[in-house]
C-alpha cells in the first residue's frame, strides 16, 4: 500500500525549532518529487516547499524562505522539514504529499499523509 | 488573501450538477495547463480529483470534470451525491518565482 506518515509535530514556543519527518512506503520514493503543504486551523491549503527526486531542485514559499529547510534521504525513504524561527502564523497541520508524475514537479499531488500538527505558542 | 479566487460556498441537490470556479491571473492559471483540484472532507487529508486541468486520476469518478478558459479554471461535479459534500481547492503552478498557489477553498453543500 502506498503510504506517507508524518511525524514530529508538537507545541513549540515562538522563535523555536522543530523537525518534521515523513516516512514513505509502498512506492519507489527516490523516483518522485515531494512536497510539504500546510493548513492553518479553519483555513485553506498553503504550499510550503517542494524537492525534486534527487534533491537537485528545491523550492520554498516566500512565507517560509530562510526559515524552513526541506530535505530527503532516499536511502531511508524519508522526507524532512526543518523549521526554525517559528512564528504563531506557522501553526498548522503539515502534510507531506507526493507529486503525481515520476521525476517531475507541479503536475499535482496524488498521495498525501494524514498530517502532523504544529502549534507555535508561548 | 489567496492567490486564486474561489467562491466560498456552493450548493446543489442530489442528482444536480454544480460548477466551482477558480480565477487566477495570466501568471498562473492563464499560462500553464497545470491546474489541479483537491477534495477534502473534514479532518481528512486532501484527495487529488483533477490534474493538468482536466485529467482524472485512476479511481476518481467520471462525475468529476475540469476545464479552463483564460485565467479561470472550473471543476464540475455532475450527478451530485451526498458524499461529494466537502471542501474543494484549486491549485496552479505559478512560474519560477511563486511556484505553487492554492485557491481559498469552496465548501460544497449537498442539500
Image: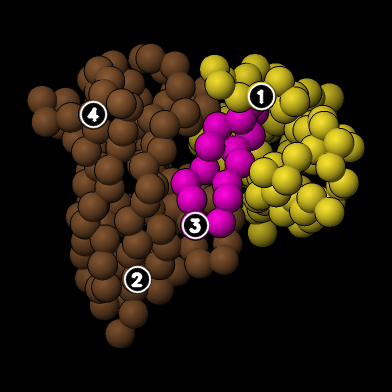
Chain colours: A brown, B yellow
Q: Dividing the image into 4 quarters, which one contains the N terminus of chain A? A: top left
Q: Are marks 3 and 4 in contact (CB under 8 Å)?
A: no
Of tags 4 and 1, which is closer to the observer?
1
For the residues labelled 2 and 1, the Cα–Cα distance comes to: 36 Å
Of tags 2 and 1, which is closer to the observer?
1
- Comparing B40 with A105, the one in front is B40
Do marks 4 and 1 both belong to one polypeptide chain? no
For the residues labelled 2 and 4, the Cα–Cα distance comes to: 27 Å
Determine the residue located farthest toward the left in the rendered image. Answer: A75
Q: Are marks 2 and 4 in contact (CB under 8 Å)?
A: no
For the residues labelled 3 and 1, the Cα–Cα distance comes to: 22 Å
Q: Which residue in the structure is indicated by mark 3?
A: B43
Marking on residue A119:
2
Q: Which residue in the structure is indicated by mark 1?
A: B61
- Comparing A29 with A35, the one in front is A29
Marking on residue A25:
4
10 Å crowding of disc 3: few (<14), some (14-19), many (20+): few
Q: Where does the magenta region start and end? A: B34-51
Q: Secondary structure at mark 4?
A: strand
Does the stretch in magenta take in B60? no
Q: Earlier in the sequence, mark 3 or mark 1?
A: 3
x, y percent for residue A21: 22, 47
Of tags 2 and 3, which is closer to the observer?
3
Task: Look at the picture and state if B33 lies above or below A43.
Answer: above
For the residues labelled 2 and 3, the Cα–Cα distance comes to: 17 Å
Amino acid at each position: 500500500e502506498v503510504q506517507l506518515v508524518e511525524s514530529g509535530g508538537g507545541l513549540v514556543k515562538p522563535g523555536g525549532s522543530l523537525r518534521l519527518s515523513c516516512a514513505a512506503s509502498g512506492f519507489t520514493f527516490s523516483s518522485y518529487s515531494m512536497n510539504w503543504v500546510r493548513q492553518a486551523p479553519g483555513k485553506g491549503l498553503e504550499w510550503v516547499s517542494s524537492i525534486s527526486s534527487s534533491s537537485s531542485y528545491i523550492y520554498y514559499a516566500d512565507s517560509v524562505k530562510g526559515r524552513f529547510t526541506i530535505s530527503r534521504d532516499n536511502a531511508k525513504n524519508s522526507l524532512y522539514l526543518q523549521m526554525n524561527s517559528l512564528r504563531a502564523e506557522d501553526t498548522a497541520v503539515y502534510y507531506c504529499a507526493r507529486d503525481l508524475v515520476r521525476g517531475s514537479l507541479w503536475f499535482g499531488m496524488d498521495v498525501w499523509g494524514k498530517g502532523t500538527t504544529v502549534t507555535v505558542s508561548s | 488573501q489567496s492567490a486564486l479566487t474561489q467562491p466560498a460556498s456552493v450548493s446543489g441537490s442530489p442528482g444536480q450538477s454544480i460548477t466551482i470556479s477558480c480565477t487566477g491571473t495570466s501568471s498562473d492559471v492563464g499560462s500553464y495547463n497545470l491546474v489541479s483540484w483537491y477534495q477534502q472532507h473534514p479532518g481528512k487529508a486532501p484527495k487529488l480529483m483533477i490534474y493538468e486541468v482536466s485529467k482524472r486520476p485512476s479511481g476518481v469518478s467520471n462525475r468529476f470534470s475540469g476545464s479552463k478558459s483564460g485565467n479561470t479554471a472550473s471543476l464540475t461535479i455532475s450527478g451530485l451525491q451526498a458524499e461529494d459534500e466537502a471542501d474543494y481547492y484549486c491549485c496552479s503552478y505559478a512560474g519560477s518565482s511563486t511556484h505553487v498557489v492554492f485557491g481559498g477553498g469552496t465548501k460544497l453543500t449537498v442539500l
